Image (spheres, rainbow, N blue to C red):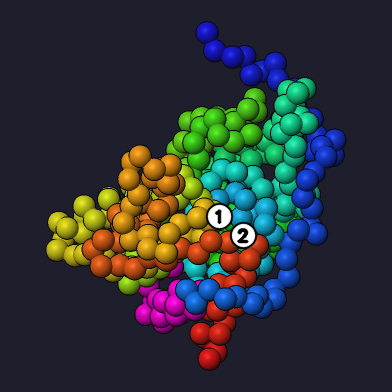
Amino acid sequence: MVFDKSKLKTKSLKERVHDLDLTAIKSLENKEYHNKDFREVALRVVEAKRKKKKIIVMLGAHVIRAGVQRYLIDLIKRDYISCIAINGGGMIHDFEFALIGATTESVARYIKEGQFGLWKETGEINDITNRAYRQGEIGMGEAIGRAIHEGNYPHKDISILAACYRLNIPGTVHIGIGYDIIHEHPNFDGAAAGATSYLDFLRFVEVVSGLEGGVLLNFGSAVMAPEVFLKALSMVRNVANQEGRDVDQFTTLVCDLHDLPDDFSKEPSKESPAYYFRPWKTMLVRTVTGGGGSFYIKGKHSETIPALWTAINEEENP
């Protein structure tokens, strides 16, 4: 037997108490920074753009909640981002911000009554995905970005996925079924979600195939980014090895709140809890052993992304 999702009752977002609204969205302003690695990474980003190499940004959902959308959209406009990869939660926050100018609910408040995540308008994401699946050849990120860009979304100007669609770069969404609130909804179609997110994965792999000489930036994704990147890079190197090419010389940056030692060039032992912080072993060590470089900067996303944006501006106009 399986759960009968037709019995579920959704409510309007008008009835939800939102934890974040448009006051969380930051304006473009230079951010003072003290970590010299911001300047070094910015140098590599500017150089990658000059040489037309790929610059990939991978985001956790909390980055959207940090209100740094305008910084990322500005970098897309200036060709400093070739692809943005987010998880399902990030897509949901991006969609809700564009639709109602607010997002995020109290889990503790709504789980008691079984209302957590069951909001009608948010479930429209499923309708968009289902239509994209029937049409074929369009991924989840592009479908949501196009819907926001072309639809009646009052705050589409702060949508990262809409910006990706408008500016013609891949905006890819990488889901795990059961992870996201829209998977609770009666209109969720696992086949549609799986197919469209898998198409996004293949689009992401294609971008990674051009990462030689480029830069990959991970802000706040402890699971999706390292795991998706690891598989994508393995696929890319499999083909590259057959063709006599290398995909080894690239730079990675991880920004998160974990404490890492000054020397993180070796992964921690399996006995250490730090071993299970996947960005360290995967993105800072294992994938760059062929000669690439890696950087780790501890900090809040509301500070690290504006700081890197500032450093890129300084490097672009010394």
Q: Residues within 10 Å of mark 1 (few under 14, many from 20)?
A: few
Left/right placement of residue 178 relative to residue 152 reads left
Image marks 2 and 1: residues in contact by CB distance under 8 Å = yes
- Residue 299 image point, x, y percent: 58, 61
Q: Is residue 24 above or below residue 27?
A: above
Which residue is outermost to the right? 15
Q: Residue at x 73, y 66 (%)?
A: 26
The amino acid type, in three-letter code, at marker 1 is Leu
Range of residues picked out in magenta: 38-56
Q: Residue at x 32, y 45 (%)?
A: 269
Q: Is residue 24 above or below residue 33?
A: above
- Under circle 1, the secondary element is loop
**Nearer to us in this view, 100 or 130:** 100
Cα gap from disc 2 to disc 1, whole angstroms: 7 Å
Q: Is residue 92 magenta?
A: no
Residue 68 visible? The answer is yes
Residue where numbered disc 2 is placed: 300
Residue where numbered disc 1 is placed: 257
Q: Residues within 10 Å of mark 2 (few under 14, many from 20)?
A: some
- Residue 257 image point, x, y percent: 55, 55
Q: Is residue 99 above or below residue 71?
A: above
- Residue 5 image point, x, y percent: 64, 19
The amino acid type, in three-letter code, at marker 2 is Lys
Tell me the quarter of the picture where residue 129 sits. Answer: top right
Tell me the quarter of the picture where residue 154 sits. Answer: bottom right
Tell me the quarter of the picture where residue 146 sits. Answer: bottom right
